[in-house]
Image (spheres, rainbow, N blue to C red):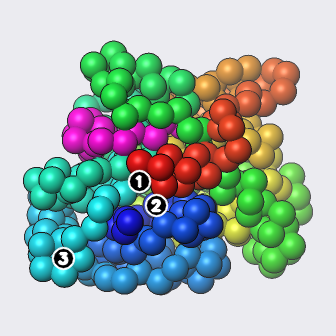
Amino acid sequence: MTILTIVGARPQFIKAAVVSHALKEAGIHEMLVHTGQHYDADMSDVFFGELGIPAPAHNLEVGSGSHALQTGAMMTGLERLVEESERPDMIMVYGDTNSTVAAAMVAAKASIPLVHVEAGLRSFNRAMPEEINRIVTDRLSDWLFCPTQTAVDHLAAEGMTEGVIMNGDVMLDATRFFAQRAAEQRPLSSLTDLEPGAYHLATVHRAENTDDPGRLAAIFDTLGKLDSPVLLPLHPRTRQKVASMDLSPSIQILPPVSYLAMLTLISNSRSVLTDSGGLQKETVWLGKPCITMRGETEWTETLEGGWNVLVGASPKAILDAVHTHPQGEPPAFGEAPEGTASGMIADTLKNA
Ligand code: UD1
């Protein structure tokens, strides 16, 4: 059996690191295709090297563009690939990016069984491109691997129960697997002069924040007023938008950092302010408070005890959240019902 796995954006490389390893252990032949959605060395190559991900067999090199241009170019490249050279037994996709939905549509139209890892997530905000990608991909999938019971329930509410498996969160596998290595190989002193607990960590890249100049200015203005310095590894999308802004000197902008560096930066932070999906979970799993600069979250489990707080782009809400401590132990979520989330995917597909 051959599985063709499509990746293209940073969070997908991290998920592929643990799932590809599990597939190999189970004796399943997998080939990776990189769409080229993320193409800067520090958005792509660094993950393959650091996490030991197998080199992609093909790179479609689509690069940036509008949603239609980017998704269309990926579909054209993938369709040609599966029709002319590499017709697999299954196509596997991760998450909710344009690379995910492009591969899902090609698989469905070529009648190739489709596996969606991280199925069933919903923000219930259709203004997010990722929400559209999730809805379409789930609808077309034959195997829907869900990280939580909440995700299973969302699918059931839309009438999807067949092929739905609650396998736990492959990002939890990755966090657990790589946290120790991060502490050893990427100590804080190699990343910043700041001491543990002496900074807030922030990331901003969601279109709803970067594409609204007023919102983006409010966020950066407020980050500049926090009581500790802010380390901000900046996504290229945001870097372009803030290039002309006058930022507070307490905001230290870094280039995008590797996954191990990110785990180290989270583990040593006071709190994490973000609009990322994955980072909300990693922060809570690593026992730090998260402040989410969005109006809603797909990861509602993180909100328990105030470990994650939704603040939108409101300066007052951001400042209040930084000074409020979460209650009790960080919530536990994303556990696999047996073994690991990535192991359950490999076992299920092996016996399919
Ligand atoms: C994408 C995903 C998002 C995911 C995120 C992770 C979609 C719709 N969004 O957003 O779900 O959370 O990846 O990072 O698929 N750029 C570069 N260099 C790069 C990559 C991007 O300069 O290596 C710039 C380009 O100017 C591009 C912009 O960033 O136009 C946005 O990139 P894009 O691929 O559209 O999506 P992301 O914002 O990265």
Q: State the residue position of label 2.
A: 12
Q: Nearer the viewer, residue 27 or 18?
A: 27
Badge 3 density bin: few <14, some 14–19, many ≥20, Cα 10 Å? some
Compute the Cα span from label 1 to label 3. Answer: 19 Å
Compute the Cα span from label 2 to label 1. Answer: 6 Å
The residue stretch that appears in magenta: 132-147
Marker disc for residue 277: none
Q: Position of residue 158 (x, y in %)?
A: 28, 20
Does 141 appear in magenta?
Answer: yes
Q: State the residue position of label 1.
A: 94
Contact check, label 1 and label 3, Cβ < 8 Å: no
Q: State the residue position of label 3.
A: 81
- Tell me if residue 149 can be seen: yes
Q: Going from the N terminus, do you reach mark 1 or mark 3 first?
A: 3
Compute the Cα span from label 3 to label 2. Answer: 20 Å
Residue 100 picture quarter: bottom left
Q: Going from the N terminus, do you reach mark 2 or mark 1 first?
A: 2
Q: What secondary structure is marked by label 3? A: helix
Left or right: where does residue 93 sit relative to residue 152? left
Residue 2 picture quarter: bottom left
Q: What secondary structure is marked by label 2? A: helix
Residue 178 picture quarter: bottom right
Q: Nearer the viewer, residue 137 or 268?
A: 137
Three-letter residue code for mark 2: Gln
Q: Is mark 3 within 8 Å of ligand 1?
A: no
